[in-house]
Image (cartoon, rainbow, N blue to C red):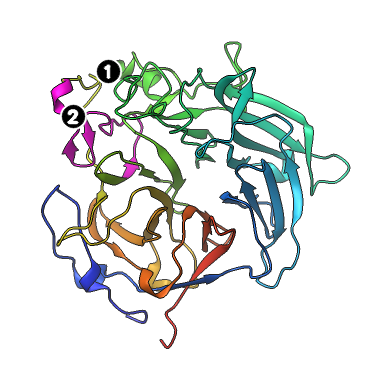
Amino acid sequence: MKYGLPLALLSFALTGSSLLAAEPAAALPRLDVRVAFPNLRFDRPVALAEPGDGSNRLFVVEQHQARIWSFANDRNIRSKHLFLQLPDPINRGNEEGLLGLAFHPNFKQNHEFFVYYSANDNSSRRSVVSRFQTSRSDRRLADPASEQRIWVSAEDPYENHNGGTIAFGKDGYLYISLGDGGAADDPMNSGQNPRDWFASILRIDVDHPQGGHAYGIPADNPSRRSRRHAHWAPEVYSIGLRNVWKFSFDRQTGELWAGDVGQNTWEMVHRIDSGGNYGWSLREGFHPFMPQRRRRADTAGPIRTPLAEYPHAPTADRPDSGLSITGGYVYRGNKIPALQGVYVYGDYDTGRIWGLRYVDGKLVANGEIVDVRKHPKLNIASFGEDASGELYILAFDGRIYEFVPPSGR
């Protein structure tokens, strides 16, 4: 292939211990990364989004400054513009702050967008999803006074495991990731409890409020469509997820992909389905987690294993280790044909970046696509996607990076 074959680095996790040979056509490209916008810097950038309005603008969320910046998607751009300074006070723990941004599918017409943040309400720790509108006098700016809280979590005793991603699916509904509450070992027993919102991905209808809420419940959410799931909270879409820091939709197929942060030993990649149970805190990846506790799985259906995992400590079979997964996107851009259809994800701690190819219900390739020895270590906080499907990397050095073919090829 044009970009080379990383056969020595391919690793597979269809089971906890075995390696599977990949078909030649399933090989992954080798890539480099470079700064995408050399003249721009940000403070703890944790999300990148584009509004789908044809403006060719990108928006970046700063976690602890609680700001959203906009700028033209132009490599030579020299300035950024403040779009929103969040009006509400926030908590600023390491995993708290302004965490998520999603533009309404009809943003061009209704000028609505949504944010996810860690609210500081009278010393009560809660996560909030709010609706905002752009300013009537200047649609390039947000109107801070337009905030309407749509969804507010239950009180959370811990500052970590907040999930924080929000995104609209092709169905027009808003999806929300929420971790297991925090600390360690699932202290709130939320992993297998579908009656609460923690350790879950939620799905709500922001356009048709009902039942005294500022949102509605889609008719095909698990609790409404399945007797086996009738005991689930109405908003819950899937359970058994420790802390989905980032999830995304494949813009071509609509499939939902998630990177789930593990605890002691393994980091996981899941493809999320409605009503799915992904095992936490009975399992971490493909492996039992603290079986001596004898906790029970939810009764709605069997636990689903991840598509892939990687270890916290390198081994002879898995030198590609890491400590905190950052979920990415399925690549649907045009600049790197060899990456087409590959799910790209990374690790915050080691800066490693992998590609996963999933074809006809089977994992056929999973391995590193960037040689971390050739680049400065990146603390990868997020990935982002522009209107053309090109991918970006957001790192805590304040830079935004992009993928390029290796130099000399």
Look at the numbered disc 1 and give the secondary structure of its residue. helix
**Residue 130 appears in the picture as rendered:** yes
Horizontal side, residue 64 vs residue 285: left or right:
right
Quarter of the image for residue 161 reads: top left
The residue carrying mark 2 is 290
For the view shown, which residue lies furthest in the right direction? 137
**How crowded is the residue under tag 1: few (<14 C-alpha within 10 Å), some, or many (20+)?**
some
Res. 5 mark: none
For the view shown, which residue lies furthest in the bottom direction? 408
Quadrant housing the N terminus: bottom left
Vertical side of 40 occupied by 375: above or below:
below
Depth check: give the residue in front, 135 or 264: 264
Q: Nearer the viewer, mark 2 or mark 1?
A: 2
Q: Label 1 sits on what residue type?
A: Arg
The residue carrying mark 1 is 228
**Residue 371 appears in the picture as rendered:** no
Horizontal side, residue 400 vs residue 343: left or right:
right
Q: Which residues are magenta?
A: 269-293
**How crowded is the residue under tag 2: few (<14 C-alpha within 10 Å), some, or many (20+)?**
few
Rendering coords of residue 330 (x, y %): 41, 56
Look at the numbered disc 2 and give the secondary structure of its residue. loop
Tell me the residue at 28%/76% (across/down): 5
Quarter of the image for residue 100 reads: top right
Rendering coords of residue 217 (x, y %): 50, 21
Quadrant housing the C terminus: bottom left
Q: Earlier in the sequence, mark 2 or mark 1?
A: 1
Q: Label 2 sits on what residue type?
A: Met
Tell me the residue at 17%/58% (across/down): 315
Rendering coords of residue 358 (x, y %): 29, 56
